[in-house]
């Protein structure tokens, strides 16, 4: 290997050092605790999937897939998300189980990044999928659970924005009548480029009424009152049906007592093309991008020959830890016992007693340490079992 690359990592890959690893581990355990309390069962799927099945169904752009060939010449991908793999399992290994299914996961996903992107290509996701329930109650449960998971893991200041892809799509199709034009506007909304959206709308050959309707869409972001305002935007039956679903969802979220964290945002457009209804994104006060998202995807399982509605969410663990802003507290700090050969048995006995008492103890032969002061800096407590030839202070 060239010396130039000896200490480098593949683009988008990251090392996780002990302190951050422990923080992520504690956070994910708190998340799992809440998810399990709601009756969700954990599942694990392979890191590698077939491109023709999970890869093509994932809705992740093709250039973001890590691809490789197996010995039989089949194209494989590193899983780019967990929704498609779980859909595959629900349609195959679990096909004889009754709906609804409540499944959970905590795993890494992989998405290739361009050099200028600066984004991770490998990251951990914690999430759930509620498969087989078409009701608004399922949407409310999933969102309420996500709020509970964020709170249980220690996040206090956050907002979950909810919208409906059916409303945006119906409005764009009704006014623009052209999918290419609609996709252009969706791109502006996905990128949160509202200035670009306004300028593009003004450049379109539309009537003043239609132009104003598209501009008014940007105002449909806020509290529950925005639902009533959305009803006045269009008479399109599909769009109005979407608004009624949002209204029903809000009422059910009130029953869960989580609406203090909820806002309406009818500008939400996801890059996940399989979403068909309610969609949502979670934001923390000190984070400039979403830390979690989800929504209803009623057509994905058709690709695996088992049509059924579904909804779910995923939380980016790295972004959550960043939003938390602090390392996880450790109630049992690490200590070290340094020993010389003639007092080895004494040191082993002492370490055993401390461990039985719930302490975390490193047992270290002092002859294996080059710089004692540097070595012991990382430990909260230092004890010595040293003979006459070594350090004179004992335990």
Image (cartoon, rainbow, N blue to C red):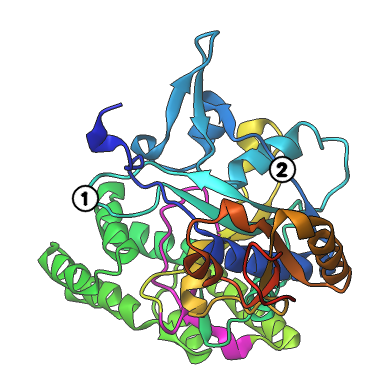
Question: Which residue is painted at 59% across and 64% down in the image?
Answer: 24
Q: Is residue 208 left or right of residue 390?
A: left
Instruction: Tell me residue 26's x, y (percent).
Output: 67, 68
- The stretch drawn in magenta includes residue 279: yes
Q: Is residue 342 left or right of residue 276?
A: right
Dot 1: what SS?
Answer: loop
Dot 2: what SS?
Answer: loop
Instruction: Tell me residue 304's x, y (percent).
Output: 65, 32
Q: Is residue 78 left or right of residue 103?
A: left
Q: Residues within 10 Å of mark 2 (few under 14, many from 20)?
A: some
Question: Which residue is painted at 67% across and 35% down in the image?
Answer: 88
Instruction: Tell me residue 39's x, y (percent).
Output: 84, 63
Name the residue tied to disc 1: 116
Measured Cα–Cα span from mark 1 to mark 2 = 32 Å
Task: Please state the extent of the stretch shown in magenta in the rendering.
Answer: 259-286
Report the front residue among 123 and 174.
123
Q: Quadrant of the C terminus?
A: bottom right
């Amino acid at each position: 290997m060239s010396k130039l690359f000896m200490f480098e990592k593949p683009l988008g890959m990251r090392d996780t050092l002990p302190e951050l690893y422990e923080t992520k581990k504690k956070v994910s355990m708190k998340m799992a605790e809440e998810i399990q309390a709601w009756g969700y069962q954990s599942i694990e799927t392979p890191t590698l999937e077939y491109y023709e099945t999970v890869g093509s169904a994932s809705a992740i752009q093709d250039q973001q897939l890590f691809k490789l060939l197996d010995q039989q010449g089949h194209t494989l991908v590193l899983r780019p998300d967990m929704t498609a793999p779980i859909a595959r399992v629900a349609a195959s290994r679990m096909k004889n189980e009754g709906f609804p299914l409540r499944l959970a996961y905590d795993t890494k996903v992989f998405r290739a990044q361009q050099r200028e992107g600066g984004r991770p290509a490998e990251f951990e996701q914690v999430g759930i999928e509620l498969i087989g329930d078409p009701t608004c109650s399922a949407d409310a449960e999933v969102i309420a659970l996500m709020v509970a998971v964020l709170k249980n893991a220690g996040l206090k200041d956050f907002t979950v924005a909810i919208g409906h892809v059916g409303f945006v799509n119906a409005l764009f199709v009704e006014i623009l009548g052209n999918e290419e034009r609609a996709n252009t506007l969706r791109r502006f909304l996905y990128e949160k480029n509202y200035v670009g959206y306004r300028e593009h709308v003004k450049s379109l050959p539309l009537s003043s009424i239609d132009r104003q309707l598209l501009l008014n869409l940007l105002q449909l972001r806020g509290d529950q009152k925005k639902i009533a305002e959305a009803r006045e935007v269009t008479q399109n039956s599909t769009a109005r049906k979407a608004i009624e679903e949002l209204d029903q969802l809000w009422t059910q979220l009130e029953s869960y007592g989580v609406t203090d964290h909820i806002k309406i945002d009818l500008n939400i457009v996801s890059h996940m093309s399989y979403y068909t209804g309610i969609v949502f994104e979670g934001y923390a006060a000190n984070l400039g991008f979403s830390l979690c998202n989800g929504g209803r995807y009623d057509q994905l399982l058709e690709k695996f020959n088992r049509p059924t509605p579904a909804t779910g969410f995923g939380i980016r663990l790295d972004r959550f830890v960043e939003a938390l802003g602090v390392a996880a507290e450790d109630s049992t700090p690490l200590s070290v016992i340094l020993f010389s050969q003639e007092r080895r048995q004494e040191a082993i006995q002492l370490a055993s007693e401390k461990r039985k008492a719930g302490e975390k103890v490193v047992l270290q032969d002092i002859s294996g340490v080059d710089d004692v002061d540097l070595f012991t800096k990382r430990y909260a407590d230092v004890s010595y079992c040293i003979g006459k030839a070594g350090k004179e202070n004992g335990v």
